[in-house]
Image (cartoon, helix red, strand yellow):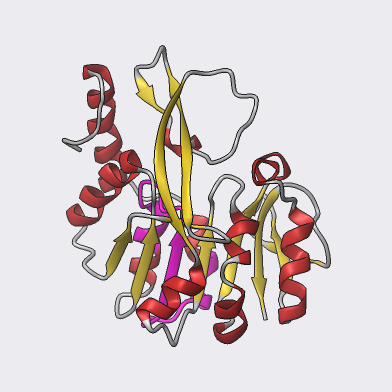
Amino acid sequence: MSDLELSFRQRLGWVAHVFKAATQNHHPELERLFAPMIAADAVIADVGAHAGQFAKMFARLAPQGHVHAFEPAPYARAVLAPALRWNGLAHVSVHPFGLSDAPGHFTLSTPLKRGRAEVGFGLAHLGTDADPRPMRTETIEVRTLDAFAAAQNLTRLDFLKADVEGWEARMLMGGMKTLSALKPKLFLELVQSSLARADTKAEDVFALLAPLGYRARKLRADATLIETAAFDGDSDYLFEV
């Protein structure tokens, strides 16, 4: 955290964010939903790891496996890393870059809330939108899932979760070889207004995955899944072969 340029009030907010990330466990309904899908030795990708709530969940579900947590935002990593250390999760690797359709660098925009006193790092995003709030901006690196899989010699990828504020389709475009070969289950947040930041739409995700044999189920408010052949409104979707 020492290399982040933060005001005194923002540093106090960082302390609160780290404490919450380390001590709280969110999404118990999703942990119950995912438990039958994830083996104890699973290899999992958490794309857009944020403060680590999903990374911690996946680490609990796969204690003999490995979790690859991708988080390009320096502030989020400054929360994520100590939260993982606090919980003793040595089988989670943090990768300081995002995933897209091609390697490169982008400007990441993070809203500042409460009169610039708090970094709204859960809303950090690439691309542009009409958000009128002041923004913290920084340059981040992106790579492709296919290049990462090749560099890591991945022969197994069981589950991939992506919540990247609109970059989900771009991430898939850069990983088609890996998805075709390894067929991981995919849990993706699809929000049309966010996907528009990357000049994509939810229908693109279905078009990319259908030729690989993926079928979709939409997450409902009661944490159950319902089959759908096409995009059926903003939500989280589980894709599996």
Residue furthest right as drawn:
229
Depicted 220 relative to depicted 149: above or below: above
Q: Residue 161 magenta-drawn?
A: no
Q: Locate residue 123, reporting x and y percent.
A: 50, 36
- Per the rendered image, the range of residues in magenta is 33-57
* 126 displayed left or right of 7: right
Depicted 169 relative to depicted 82: above or below: below
Count how many numbered circles sit on residues in the image: 0
Please name whichever residue, 161 or 75, is drawn nearer the observer in this view of the structure: 75
Q: Residue at x 54, y 84 (%)?
A: 182
> For residue 76, which quarter of the picture?
top left
Q: Locate residue 220, reporting x and y percent.
A: 69, 54
Depicted 211 relative to depicted 77: above or below: below
* 56 displayed left or right of 234: left
* 68 displayed left or right of 14: right
Q: Which residue is drawn at 40% across and 45% down?
A: 140
Q: Residue 44 magenta-drawn?
A: yes
Please name whichever residue, 20 or 216, is drawn nearer the observer in this view of the structure: 216
Q: Locate residue 29, reporting x and y percent.
A: 52, 57
Q: Does residue 179 appear in this view?
A: yes
Q: Does residue 223 appear in this view?
A: no
Q: Which of the image's four quarters has the C terminus?
A: bottom right
Q: Residue at x 29, y 65 (%)?
A: 93
Residue furthest front as drawn:
104
Q: Which of the image's four quarters has the N terminus?
A: top left
Please name whichever residue, 215 or 47, is drawn nearer the observer in this view of the structure: 47
